[in-house]
Amino acid sequence: MSDINIGEKILQYRKSKGLSIRDLAKLADVTPSLLSQIERGLANPSVNSLKSIANALNAPLFTFFTSEVKKEDLIVRGNNRKKFILPGAYNVIYEILTPDSNDNIEFAIMDLSSKTSSCTEQIYHNGYEIAYILEGEVNLYLDKEKFELQKDDSVKIPVGMHHKWENNSDYNARVVFAVIL
């Protein structure tokens, strides 16, 4: 984890607002000298000074404590997806579409081979699931009810609802889904 340069973030915000050091110092009720030292990394602001600067910039205080995201890390190339196959005779392949699993959303494609199901017993999530049938036909069991879904159908599965995907056809099926925790 890299260190966060609060002064540099304040400088970027100040410049994006078109403010001089004197202008921001006046708005934040701090001295221009202190603000200059903070921006150059020569001084650390007190919590009160940081709150005043954030208010003057009309920026949330937490903004100064977040690290910048590398934009290339947000992209998952089609030929570089993480894949995993469920153990056993299921023949179910999952391709992970999100770059990491640290967020509160899981986004994936499920490939269901002919005559297979996603699991033996119905499962549930602590979040809700939204799914879209990309290819083929599948049966979706929601609690004790069975629903037949075809290409271009979609579904929202509520938090905690037991469910299972099944492909009884002679063709493979693909389902894209997101689980939002």
Image: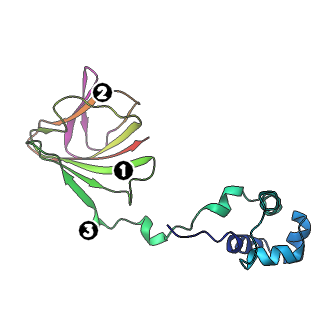
Q: Which mark is residue 16?
A: none
Between the residue at mark 3 and the residue at mark 1, the CA separation in whole angstroms equals: 16 Å
The residue shown at (79%, 77%) is: 37
Residue 35 is left or right of residue 158, and the answer is: right
Estimate the x, y position of residue 175 in percent, counting from the top left: 27, 46
Residue 80 is left or right of residue 38, and the answer is: left
Estimate the x, y position of residue 127 in percent, counting from the top left: 41, 36
Estimate the x, y position of residue 167 in percent, counting from the top left: 15, 38
User: Amino acid under label 2?
Assistant: His
Between the residue at mark 2 and the residue at mark 3, the CA separation in whole angstroms equals: 33 Å
Total number of numbered discs in the rendering: 3
Residue 23 is left or right of residue 15, and the answer is: right
Q: Earlier in the sequence, mark 3 or mark 1?
A: 3
Give neighbour class at mark 2: few <14, some 14-19, many 20+ (Cα, 10 Å).
some
Residue for badge 3: 79
Give neighbour class at mark 1: few <14, some 14-19, many 20+ (Cα, 10 Å).
many
Residue for badge 1: 107
Q: Which residues are magenta?
A: 135-154
User: Amino acid under label 1?
Assistant: Phe
Image quarter in which the C terminus is found = top left
Q: Of residues 150 and 165, which is closer to you in this image?
A: 165
Q: Is residue 22 magenta?
A: no
User: Amino acid under label 3?
Assistant: Asn
The residue shown at (44%, 65%) is: 74
Residue for badge 2: 162
Q: Earlier in the sequence, mark 1 or mark 2?
A: 1
| Secondary structure mostly seen in the magenta stretch | strand
The residue shown at (71%, 77%) is: 41
Q: Earlier in the sequence, mark 2 or mark 3?
A: 3
Up the image or down, 13 lies above or below 152; here it is: below
Between the residue at mark 1 and the residue at mark 2, the CA separation in whole angstroms equals: 19 Å
